[in-house]
Amino acid sequence: MKKIILLALCVLCIWAQEPGEEGSARTEDALFNRIEGYVLLNRKMKEYEQTDGNSSAYRQILTELEDEKDAILREIPKIVVTQKISQESTDKFLKTKKNLKELQQKSKNQPFVHMNASLDLIHLQMIEYFYSALVKLKKLFENAASSREMVGLIDEAMSDLQGISSANLSAYKAKITHSNELEKINSKEALIEDTFASYVEILKYLRNNAHLLESNYLFSILALQKWIDKINQSAGIEAINLGKIVISLLVLAFFMSLRKFFSHIVYFLLVKLIYRNKMDADDIKSIFIENIKKPVGFLLVIYAASLCLTIALYPAPVNISISNAFHIIYAIFIAWLILGVLDGYGVVLVSKLAQKSGKKEVVNLVIKILYFVIIVIAFLFVLAQLGFNISAIIASLGIGGLAVALATKDIIANFFASILLLFDDSFNQGDWIEIDGVEGTVVETGLRKTTIRTFDNSLVFLPNSIIMGANIKNWSKRRIGRHVKMYLGVGYDATPEKLEACVADLKELLKTSPLVAQPSDSALKYGDRSAKYRQNLVSINDLEGYKNDCYVALSDFGESSINIELYFYTKTISAEKFREARQALMLEFMRIVEKNGLSFAFPSRSIYIENFPPLEGIKKP
């Protein structure tokens, strides 16, 4: 009996062709009519392709035929799960199959009759395996099977079809000599070939869209159909399905109410159980929930709408176009949700990592790359749901790679320059740098450009490719030692002894001042343990940014002063403390100059008037 049930739909192929039967008008013939129509469309397309495939008119016809095939494919999942079985058709099918087998056995000495019966039997077996697979698929749908089980069933059916179609009857065909008989055999072989190709296309379509047949999973788990039936029986209204309406409204109300709490649930699962820093808990919670509140709300509403649609259409599956539309919406809102999570919890967590590692620009670039990857994945998924061949799109990038590279060479150059800048360690975010006449603080290094905030509070954007080819002066790459070079000009009334004493006092001040970098302030003192070993390979003080040179000496005789040169480095490098240290030292310099009886010179000019003897012949007044 099980075998008969599995073969029931197959009989439709024979019964629908018999005269006197109104098979096309019967409900159980709907699937057969669609599939036979699909086979016919394939045969028409094959004929047109063999006539003139380059003509624009024929290409238009092929496009229309392809659209008709797509329309049939979209209907098939719904018809499969609603198809009914006719016992009468099953009996006719079994009888026909039995007769063909008997004829095949009796006609082994008649090549044409034997081969004709064999081809009919192959065609019949092909129909049997195909429709049996659809019946089994319907049962899996009714039992709430997973898409994986359905895919396994379809793969098995395609393997069986392949085995049937590969039967070798060439020995019998070689014995047929009559042209009319040979033409009939060729025609049946072509029919079998077209039928096999059509069946495989349909099975592949069902395989790729097996998720559509999982739509009754909710009904199986929650037994919703029982509740729908109870509500309909209690209401006693036959005009409308009150049970589906009530269940749909309850589902919609449930998810609408859950919308307010789901953000807190996601926060608890993703943040509370992972990040347990109580100091930042309030900040993270407010930022996180604020960022995901909208995408979570929209996602729940859309999901509730899809469930209501599933309930309304049950037991038929949701149409593939509608299902694809929902999947596209899911992809958009899920991508939005992930970006919200990154903006909320991710930014706080990554900021901690950046604070510990000191490489803020690397972490910042990683976040931007994650944003880009998420958006690209969502975009490709949307294209796939719209019917585009993603593999072909990716492959076409290789063909048009040269054109793309030429068109986007600046973008590509800037992108790779940003990667090189990160690993080159020329500067970090927050560094005070000077590049190509632009001086300021580095705001961030992006995928295309580096942003610098100048000291007059303007924002400058430099392409990374330009930065890679420019001279970079990084004032922040200093550990100890900010340079000071100044001249103290004293008057020409100074004696050598006073100058010597003044210079000696100045040297002593710089040598003992805690504000000035001393010879002991070096990488060997403040650096890591490997500094003393690396000192033999490279000037470690210059590499790490330690400067402690100190010189005090008479410099030159100026127009108005004798100049004393002061060349040293302050210990601090920060702008505020550097200015405070320089001020304190300048005041000490003034005290030393005054202590040694010297005075600061200022620009002056002495005019000497000489008395000449009177010229002869000129009387004095």
Image (tube, rainbow, N blue to C red):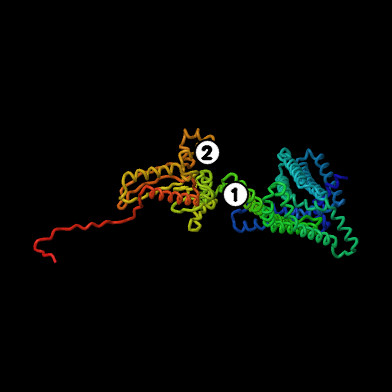
Horizontal relation, residue 409 to residue 61: left or right: left
Give percent across and percent down for residue 103: 82, 42
Quadrant location, the C terminus: bottom left
Residue that appears at 34% across and 50% down: 490
Which is more toward the observer, 288 or 535? Answer: 535
Q: Secondary structure at mark 2?
A: loop
Q: Is residue 455 visible?
A: yes
Residue 369 shows which numbered tag? 1
Q: Is residue 44 visible?
A: no
Q: Name which of mark 1 and mark 2 comes first in the sequence.
A: 1
Pair 1/2: label in front: 2
Cα separation between marks 1 and 2: 34 Å
Give percent across and percent down for residue 264: 73, 54
Give the image quarter of residue 296.
bottom right
Horizontal relation, residue 382 to residue 315: left or right: left
Which is more toward the observer, 450 or 452? Answer: 452
Give percent across and percent down for residue 263: 72, 55
Residue that appears at 27% across and 56% down: 606
Residue 527 shows which numbered tag? 2
Residue 416 shows which numbered tag? none
Question: Callout 2, which amino acid?
Answer: Gly
